[in-house]
Amino acid sequence: MAYDYETLGIEYDKGVLTATINNPPMNVMTPPLYMDLVGFTSEVEKDESVKVVVFQSADADFFIAHFDVEAILEFPIDTPAEKSLEFSDFHLMCERVRTMPKATIVKMAGRAGGGGNEFASSCDMRFGLKGKTVINQMEVALGILPGGTGTQRLPRLVGRGRAMEICLGSDDIDAETAAQWGYLNRVFDSANELDGFVDSLSKRIACWPAEAIALCKASINNAEMPLSDGLLEEAFLFQQTLRTKGAQQNMRKAMAMGLQTREGELRMGELCYDFAQAANDED
């Protein structure tokens, strides 16, 4: 894969691809950044060498400020609004990070607003920094509404009432509140702690079999189905994982290294990493 983008710096290391957003002066999602994100998400979705995608920012104060309002003012309004039967390119971009067969992680050390927050909320996990991370959906204050997944994604993340507060209030939500509400997975006291945790988590996930990551993510996304449908899909996806080389290899390696022994079960987190590393070394 080429990964040549004007506003994104790309680094790859052992299954983890990090995309650093760099669009001065404050990472507004201008058309160039937007097109880079559309192109990048399309490209990385197909890259079988990547198991984890981490999005971060070169600007300590902003993840993505919001979508470019000057560009929105150029949207055509000379005809009546029409309901489309297809997703917009923005919706498709957000759906790619939500559904692509690899983990998507946002390292949100600064602000995320508007379309930037909608993009971040479509990813699988978000980690923030106390005193720095802030989210804001300012659209209603501008006379519009969050039209890039926000009114659909946020209620699924934080619940209807809190989504109403975020969207209708158009006010800053701090890191601690966002974590309490379930928007952020965790918040950290320092940038070093944030970097260290996300780096460790992404490398850990990248040790697991790619098929297991992809199918587990698909099954979790199915939680938006009615429960009975989701359970049937879960059973089907479980059966698919059983038939992969990675599952057979890792389960046998785990048993050989202490799974289902008292000593092994008492250190399960470490054991998972150890047997996955051992299985990878054999490939």
Image: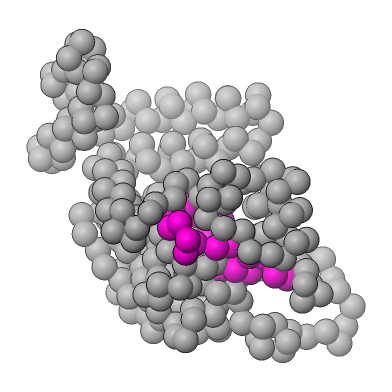
Q: Quadrant of residue 31?
A: bottom right
For the residue pair 254 and 141, the one nearer the viewer reads as: 141
Numbered-mark total: 0
Q: Is residue 125 magenta?
A: yes
Q: Position of residue 120 (x, y in %)?
A: 52, 60
Q: Quadrant of residue 255?
A: top left
Q: Is residue 73 magenta?
A: no
The residue at the point 31 percent across, 46 percent down is 201
The answer to whether residue 151 of the structure is visible from this angle is no
For the residue pair 81 and 277, the one nearer the viewer reads as: 277
- Position of the C terminus, as image quadrant, is top left
The residue at the point 42 percent across, 25 percent down is 239
Q: Position of residue 62 (x, y in %)?
A: 48, 72
For the residue pair 149 and 198, the one nearer the viewer reads as: 198
In this rendering, position of residue 80 left or right of residue 137? right
Please, is residue 98 above or below residue 63 in the view? above
The answer to whether residue 256 of the structure is visible from this angle is yes
Please identify the residue farthest to the right as the structure is shown.
80
Q: How is the image coloured?
A: one colour
Q: Position of residue 98 (x, y in %)?
A: 52, 52
The magenta span reads 113-139
The residue at the point 33 percent across, 75 percent down is 9
- Position of the N terminus, as image quadrant, is bottom left
The residue at the point 26 percent across, 48 percent down is 200
Q: Position of residue 124 (x, y in %)?
A: 48, 49
For the residue pair 165 and 189, the one nearer the viewer reads as: 189
Please, is residue 32 above or below residue 39 in the view? below
Please, is residue 67 above or below residue 232 in the view? below
